[in-house]
Structure formats: structure tokens, C-alpha cells
Image (cartoon, rainbow, N blue to C red):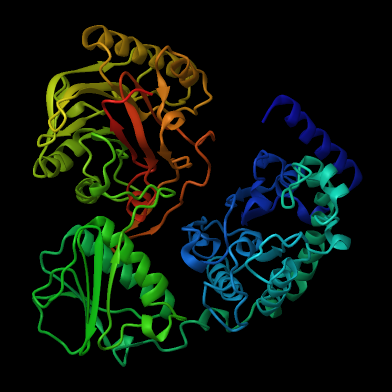
Amino acid sequence: MSDFLENEVSAFVESSKADVNIATLHGLKVNLIGDSYLKGHTMNTAMVWPSLLSDKYSWILTNYAKNGNMLSTFGNADPQPIVTRFGQMADNDPDIVIINGGRNDYNHTVPIGKSDSTDTGTFKGALHTLFVGLRKKYPNAMFVFTTVWNFPDTNSGTTLTYLDYAKAAEEICAAHGVYCFKAYDPDVSGVDMRNAEFRAVYCLSPGDISHLNFAGMKLVTPKYEAFLAECLADWTVHKDNLIPKTAESFIESRPFFCCGVELSKYRIVQSTNATIDEQIFSAYLRNHLKNKYGIDLALTTDSEAETAYELLIGKTDRTTIFAEKNQFHISASEGKVQFIAGDARGYESLCEYVTKVLFYPEAEENDRPNNGFSYTGKADNNLTSGTICASDLLGDTRIMFYNVCNANSPSGSIALRSRVYESLIQSYQPDVFGMQETGADFHMYLTPLLVRNGYTEVGSPVGDKNYTAMFYRAKTCRLLDSGWHLFSGPNNSNSKSISWGVFVDIASGERFIVLNAHFMYNQKGIDGPAARLNNAKESLSLIRRLQATYGDTPIVLGGDLNDSLMSGALTYLRNADGVFCAWDVANEKNDTAGYHRYATYDEDASSWVKWEEPTENYLSDRTIDHAFVCGNCSVLRYVKVLSLYTYWLSDHMPQILDVSLRSPH
């Protein structure tokens, strides 16, 4: 936020303090989840009305809102809708949870649904499921839902209007003791999106029928302020009566049948030699059934005697089905349900399918695991989330950069995560794989796994103390030259460095160079921006030396650069002659930050149980992993991989570049 805007915010907050100061609103812990109404769209999030109230009343505010977010799962139009994403919110015991949604559901023609439904493909069902889940997560919090504004009918594919979604929200809020702010009513909110004169003054543009500008946020702030104060006063008196006693057991009280038998009679069976993907899926399925239905199925191996009702996971000695790479297959008959996938991408998609379709309360009868049921699914490419398949390489070579998190907690041990990294490598099959934070433990556990998959490490003079280790796939690449450079200046544990290699792509005969880098981060007692600018200068100096030797050979520099694209260090690289940011020039790309908080691995559950997805866009301050290219090449695809596995493994997302080595920018 610029100094001017920061001063504008401060001036409004100070003026508001002088006008109104409500004692009960001071010092609250508040969580938000919703769409651009709470995120701000293109406006700085510090200028949305909850942030203004937070500044005024010294809240501890956590904003989980996401631009463009749907509330429901309808049509899988949003891979992370609010109804599933709320589970990633911190268990921080807030005083208030503020929720909004519906505008984007209207855009996608989401059906309103039945009032008693938990079908998250409908608006009412999604709201019901969301409120039940939030109440379990935050048993002591006051919930406030703010409806859509009134807005013109713009979706020609439906007869539904803003009012249908607003009234549906009111109804479900009332059933769950959730306070509902009638933002659709101009007399309540002060917002009239159907009025062109209003939009000209209070919206981001006169044609914008959804998003308030700062003047609009200042207009609605006192409305929400007064409403929250009224709700808190009522909550203090009537809290026990407002929380539905049946909410927690609504879903679990109904039995779920599998092949005509109650699911509780089953057990989960995997091979005695189960792969890491099979183990993860078994734990994931078991946790889902426990949390959704209150059924805690026994987990055993195929070394034990066969029983009548079994959920068979992967290649057990009783499995009769198979799946190709990027696929999963399910088959049910005679009390046995078999699940198998061809690789990590297949198992990721299988996780999604069983939780959102197969073992879902409102599943259609044909989607339930009855006798004779058979289903084959495919892990298709999804550019939005970057979940691409190895078989879909664009161009000549695939390069992957990944900060793998050199820690044993909270995201699981390095030994455990190394096995999952191996599975991801098998799925994405990069020709060159550059990692950051690869200390001695990673060399001990991960290196042998990569070697057995046909990868060779690019050597360095520091051996297993190389924190920027790099590997190449021997069947697709040949190493011509290599080196290692330790950045000068501040450098914790000598971990900030560049490993580089000059390769020949065996199929095309073309030469290319990869530099795997890790820049210095902000640390007490050092000037972080100055250190990173120095790292950038030394990186460019190395690029120029390699260009002097190898001419116009394509060069890709990437890794954890610990800075935003607009920083001094990365602006220096972007301004360098012939150097291009991969995100700027890629033919295909996704728009995500890539950095997020650590996942949590639950040893007792043998599964990752909490994780946070990156919600900012690529140009945000939370984008600190980058790639740059120069020379005679073209970036055909640049993605940050957003998937269950990568949420779990590290606090960073992998970067993948598919590069053509024979076409210039």
C-alpha cells in the first residue's frame, strides 16, 4: 500500500474513533472467509471494511477470503470453494467468524437446493455443510454472514437473481444461529449496485456491479460496526439458544451403506508392502470416514485373514483391478470395494473423488459404491492449479524448482516426506530438478530414491552440505559442465548458493543451462533487501560468464529467491538485458503465490490433517519462488503446482517450466 493510501486509511480510522467508539468491539480475534467482497478484488486488502475496523479496535484479524471464490462445489468450477477451504483455517479460537459468499455461485448458475440438504453442489447444502463444519471447528465463536449486494441480473443462463441467494442465506443462517447482515438491502447496507450514480462514486469503476472502492468501504464500515456490536450484545445473552444442538450430529446420524451393508461393518486393507501413495490414501480415506460419519474403520494388511467386507487399497494380494498412469479405478462387488491408482496424480484425484462423490452424504444412488459399481477417473491437466501430467510435456525439456523444507516438523519427517517427493518426481518427471534447503538429511534419504528412478546429482565441492542440490534425468539429459557458487555477504549455514549445470537434451541435441538458486531471507541483524540485491547481482554475473562461454544457449535461473517480483533484487534481474521473468513470457501459466504456512503431520492418524493453500496472486508479496530465462528458448508453460501432496510436503509449491530450446522469445 502506498504512503498516500496508508495515510488515507489512518485518517479514516482516526476520524472514526472520534465519532464512535464501542467498548465491546475492542481487542477481538476475528477470522474472515469469503470472496472478493472481503478480499478487496484489485484493491489492497488493508482497505476493506473488516481491516478498517481491525485497525480501529486492535483486532487480531486473519483474512482467508479469496477473489473469485465460490461457496459451493457445483460443477467443480472452483477447485477450492469456501465449503471445503474452511478446513484450512487456523484453530485459533476466534471471537467472531465473518463469512460471505454467493456472488460467484450466481455467476456459475449454482442451484439453490433444498433446505435440509448437505449437497455442497447446491447453495443451501453448501451453506448448511459450511456452518456445521465451522461450528465444530469454532464451538465458541459468534458467526456473522453477510449476503450479496443487490446487483443487476447478468447471468442469462438462469432465472435466479441476487435475491434468491440472499434469501437462501438468510434461511440457512437462521437454522444455525448465524447472524445475517442483509447487504442486499440498500436501507441496511447503504449499497445499491443497481444505481449507476452510486457505482460511479463508490465502486472500483462505474461498470463494476460487485466491488466497492475505498469510498464505498468507508461508507459501509459504520453499518457493519453497528451490526456487529448489536450481534455481540445478543450473543452474550442468547448464545446457548442460538447454537443448534443437532448441528454436530446431522450428517453422522444417517447410516451410509456400501454394497448394501452399513459402512461401519467394513475394514480398510492395504498390502504389507504398501507404497507411500497407498498409505497416504488409506489414512486420508479413514480420516474422512471418521470425520464425516463418525465411523472409525480398522486399518490392517492383507497378511491377515480375509473378511466379508473390505475396502482394498492399492495392490493387495486380493486386488483384481489396475489403473494406468494418471488414472484411478474403483470396483465394488460382493462386499469388496477396490481402490487403485497408477501414480501419485491418480491417488490425488482418487482422494478428491471419494470425499466429494463416492463417500459423500448426498451422493446420487449411481455414485454410491453398490454391488456392480465400477468407475475409472483420470487426473487431467488443470492449468489453474498446475496439476499437469508427465505425459503432457510441452517443448523439449521440463525443469522443476522446489524448496523442500529442511525440517522434521510440523510437516512430517524428512525421511517420510522424501518418499512422497519420490512419488511426485515419478508423476511429473522433470528432466532437471533443482531443490532448495537440501541439507545432509535430504542427501541421506532422498538422494537414493532419486537415483533409483534414474536421476544423477550434479556434483558440488561441499557434498551433502549443498543446500541447493540439483539432479538430472540421465535418460533425457547429458551433463557437460557444472559448478557451485556460494553467495557472499550474509549467509546462514552457507545455505544460500547456486548450483548450475550445462546439459544436452538427448532427444533434440540442444544445449541448455540451469541455475538453481536460494537467496537470503530477512533475518534479525541483517539488511535482507540489500543481501538479496547482492545475490541477484552475483547471479547475473554468473549468467554473463556462462554466456561468454556458451553463447546464446538457453539459460533458466530459478528457485526460492525470497522476494516479490517488484522488489529491488528481482527488478534488477528483470531489467537486465536479455533476461525475462518466466511468468511474464510464458505461453501458459497459473496465477498463484506458491508460498504458504506449514502443513501439520499427525503421527497418530498417519496423515496430514491441516494445511493452508496459497491464496495470493503471483504479483503479491507472498510470491517468493521465481524463474528467469534468457537465450534462444521459449517458455511454453510455467506453473506452481497446487495439490494435496504439495500442500502437505513443504511451505512452498514446486515450480515447473516446460521449455522449447529452439525458439526465441
Q: What is the quadrant of residue 469 in the picture?
A: top left
Which residue sits at x=15%, y=64%? 274
Quadrant position of the N terminus in the picture: top right
Q: Left or right: 5 with respect to 443?
A: right
> Is the residue 646 above or below the residue 518 in the image?
below
Tally of marks = 0
| Viewer-closest of 612 and 92 | 612
Viewer-closest of 504 and 120? 504
What is the x, y in percent for residue 480?
12, 20
Is residue 345 visible in this depiction of the protein? yes
Q: Residue at x 16, y 60 (%)?
A: 275
Q: Residue furthest right?
A: 19
Residue 310 position, x and y percent, is: 21, 82
- Judged left or right of residue 234, residue 326 is left
- Image quadrant in which the C terminus is located: top left
The picture quadrant where one finds residue 560 is top left
Q: Is residue 128 above or below residue 389?
A: below
Task: Determine whether 314 is above or below 538 in the image.
Answer: below
Q: Is residue 605 visible?
A: no
**Residue 140's spot in the image, x, y percent?**
62, 67
User: x and y percent of residue 209 in the render?
Assistant: 74, 52
Q: Nearer the viewer, residue 587 or 409?
A: 587
Q: Nearer the viewer, residue 171 or 150?
A: 150
